[in-house]
């Protein structure tokens, strides 16, 4: 995992309803050490329901950054959609070693769950 580049917002500032690692791959906590360009499975972002210990799925965007620039692939609308879960191999098929996978919650109050993962072979 790389620097989260958190875009702090007043909304959600005092909320602690995210786990240390809010990413799940196939229903299990994502192991950053074993996450590579060949990883496959259903990726989701979770948090705790306010006032409860029950987990909820958080909607998110995914994007790829290469050489400091966000990729804009005209034939691939997958990078511009909101997801509650996604087959990660669809995104990784577009990536190259050294790219960064950005997982960014759609709601401002969920900013603490943003993650940036450097992709390795």
Image (spheres, helix red, strand yellow):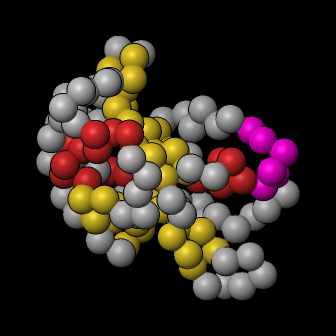
Q: Position of residue 53 (x, y in %)?
A: 66, 84
Indicate the quadrant containing the C terminus: top left, top right, bottom left or bottom right.
Answer: top left
At x 25%, y 53%, the residue is: 88
Determine whether 113 is above or below 56 in the image.
above
Which residue is nearer to you in this view: 7 or 38? 7
- Is residue 62 inside the magenta stretch? no
Determine whether 68 is above or below 76 in the image.
above
Q: Which residues are magenta?
A: 8-13
Indicate the quadrant containing the N terminus: top left, top right, bottom left or bottom right.
Answer: top left
Which residue is nearer to you in this view: 71 or 1? 71
Q: Position of residue 76 (x, y in %)?
A: 22, 36
At x 67%, y 77%, the residue is: 49
Residue 30 appears in the picture as rendered: no
At x 45%, y 46%, the residue is: 61
Determine whether 115 is above or below 118 in the image.
below
Name the main secondary structure of what is drawn in magenta.
loop
Task: Answer left or right for 116 relative to 34.
Answer: right
Which residue is nearer to you in this view: 36 or 54? 54
Q: Position of residue 69 (x, y in %)?
A: 39, 17
- Residue 24 in which image quadrant: bottom left
Task: Answer left or right for 6 relative to 104.
Answer: right
- Is residue 11 inside the magenta stretch? yes
């Amino acid at each position: 995992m790389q620097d989260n580049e958190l875009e702090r917002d007043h909304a959600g500032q005092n909320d602690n309803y995210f786990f240390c690692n809010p990413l799940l791959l196939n229903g299990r906590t994502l192991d950053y050490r074993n996450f590579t360009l060949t990883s496959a499975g259903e990726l989701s972002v979770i948090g705790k329901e306010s006032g409860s210990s029950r987990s909820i799925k958080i909607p998110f965007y995914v994007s790829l950054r290469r050489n400091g620039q966000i990729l804009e692939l005209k034939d691939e609308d997958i990078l511009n959609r909101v997801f509650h879960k996604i087959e990660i191999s669809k995104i990784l098929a577009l990536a190259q070693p050294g790219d960064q996978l950005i997982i960014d919650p759609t709601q401002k109050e969920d900013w603490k769950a943003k993650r940036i993962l450097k992709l390795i072979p």
